[in-house]
Amino acid sequence: MLTHSRLSRIGLTVICGVASLALSVSCHNDNSSPTSPGMATVNGTVIRGSGTFEARPLGMEIPLSGVTVRVMPSGPSTQTDASGNFSLSGAPAGNVEMEFTRADINARGSVVLASGSNSITASIAGGTAVITPRGHAGEEIEGRVGFVNIGNGSLVVQDQRLGSVTVSVSVATIIRKGNVSVSLSAIGSGMSVHVKAMLQSDGTYIATEIL
């Protein structure tokens, strides 16, 4: 026959066991909850853009100092230094909109930020900021022309490093054959070209110069 004291000990053991199991389940559920979105750090340079697509020839960037850089709508903010450089931490990873303001500047642009460190260049023209997810917005593209589309102002270049690259031209694009300025129609399939271009926020290229 079980004594009263022994029954009490058994009951206490069962209660403790149930409590331990509940605590274990609770901890397991906490660990399986979705993790919060990653955070990003942005190191960038703000420059003045020009032309229809806010592009500038390589090596001719004009840095913009004293520009307030803010992650919209109410994220972290900082200000560019004398060289147009800035560093901003605590931004959310993913597709974000950034605002660039100064007494004479009020522009916005979007960029996809990865968790961790990001390096960007923001080219400002009017109310538009073309943000390129890299330390320098310029690219050198070299190879044979695969196709030229005069109608939409673009050409496809077979670059050994980048592969097949579609490059658009604008009214600001300089096209030269030797020392003579020519139009896009002077370029044909199979010709070798050297293109200086700017990488845009949507991953396309805008040519600043085609040789």
Image (spheres, rainbow, N blue to C red):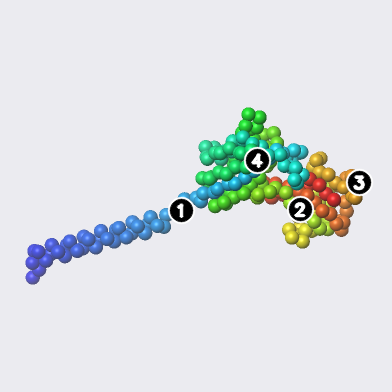
Kindly report which numbered mark, 1 or 2, lies closer to the viewer in this rendering.
Answer: 2
Label whose residue precedes the other's in the sequence (1 or 3): 1
Looking at the image, which is closer to me, 12 or 60? Answer: 60
Tally of numbered discs? 4
In the depicted structure, whether residue 125 falls above or below residue 57: above
Label 3 and label 2: CA atoms lie apart by 21 Å
Can you identify the residue that label 1 sits on?
Answer: 35
With 61 as the anchor, is 5 left or right in this view? left
Does residue 112 appear in the picture of this structure?
no
Residue bearing mark 2? 140
Q: Amino acid at mark 1?
A: Thr
Place of residue 203 in the rendered image (x, y in percent of width and height, measured from the top left) = 69, 50
Q: Amino acid at mark 2?
A: Glu
Residue 144 marker: none
- Tell me if label 3 and label 2 are in contact, CB under 8 Å: no
- The image shows residue 6 at horizontal and vertical percentages of 11, 66
Q: Which is nearer the N-term, disc 1 or disc 2?
A: 1
